[in-house]
Image: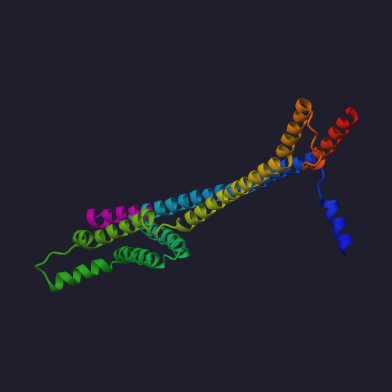
Amino acid sequence: YTTMFDRVKNNLRINSLSRRLRVAFTSIILLLIFSGAMSLLELERVSHDTEEILMASKSNVDIAGEMIAALNEQNDAMIYMAVVGDERESHRVNCLNSIEHLRLATESACVRMSATDNSTAADSLRMQAERINQMANDYLDKRVHLHILESEATDSITPFNTQIWYADQYKVQYMNMSRHITKYMTGTNSTLGPEVNNLSHTARRAVTPVFISLIVMLVVVIMFYYFLRVYYLNPVLRINRSLGDYLTYKMPFDEGMEARDELKTLRDRIAQLISKLN
């Protein structure tokens, strides 16, 4: 087992200075390529998450716009019928359509809020939409008119008509619904929270490989400097100094200086040349 281990060790050993330099530079290049590929991958995820956030934001704005449009359409119809007294069929049809549009848009907004753990806000928005839609249905079904007649029968002194009903009751619910829609658009009920958190985490993941690569590269550079200093620069300086002493002072060339690989071969050949000259 020892012999086999020695063979494997000898096969894996790099006995050339040039090969060691190539391995070092290749390792740095591969590390840069790896960190760059990881960063590009994470940046692609950042781009994807950003696109999802923009799409979610656009969807929120579209839903809020649908709710506002339906609410305003219903309010316009109620003004024509309850305040102006114009009971044409076209206003009734517009009111019925706006009730359905408001219900559908509100349901879409509630689904998005419930998916982000905003169930309380979703329930509040749904209840407010149901409340104002019920008031519109009560007017269309003549229940408001019946209530007015009953009020006039029991209290003939205090005036009560459709204009007062609109100003005191319906308009209050209209303003409440408007505030709920505004809160959905700009408040804490926005559904962008999870997407923004995912984008933040992905951005950190995109930076992490680069940071790790910088640390590893710093360690590699320090080790590379040590390698050059010990195995290349110091032997070259010793060979140069010993050869200079021989040429200047005829001092014996130091054949026992520590050197490896190509520098060891160079040292031995210089020693052989000097021995032949002597």
Image x and y of residue 2, in percent? 87, 63
Q: In the rendered structure, which segment of residues is drawn in magenta?
A: 69-88
Of the pair 55 and 65, the residue shown nearer to us: 55
Quarter of image, res 114: bottom left
Of the pair 97 and 35, the residue shown nearer to us: 35
Image x and y of residue 38, in percent? 63, 49
Q: Tell me what residue is drawn at x 81 percent, y 47 percent.
A: 14
Q: Going by the image, does 121 lie left or right of 276?
A: left
Q: Residue furthest top?
A: 248
Of the pair 54 and 200, the residue shown nearer to us: 200
- Can residue 248 be seen in this snapshot? yes
Numbered-mark total? 0
Of the pair 167 and 13, the residue shown nearer to us: 13
Image x and y of residue 210, in percent? 59, 47
**Predominant SS of the magenta segment:** helix
* Colour convention of the picture: rainbow
Image x and y of residue 9, in percent? 83, 55
Q: Going by the image, does 271 lie left or right of 160?
A: right
- Can residue 89 be seen in this snapshot? no
* The C terminus lies in quadrant: top right
- In the figure, 252 relative to 2: above or below? above
- In the figure, 209 relative to 171: above or below? above
Quarter of image, res 79: bottom left
Q: Residue furthest bottom?
A: 154
* The N terminus lies in quadrant: bottom right
Q: Residue furthest left?
A: 157
Q: Tell me what residue is drawn at x 24 percent, y 55 percent.
A: 85
Q: Going by the image, does 121 lie left or right of 54?
A: left
Confirm whether the magenta stretch covers residue 86.
yes
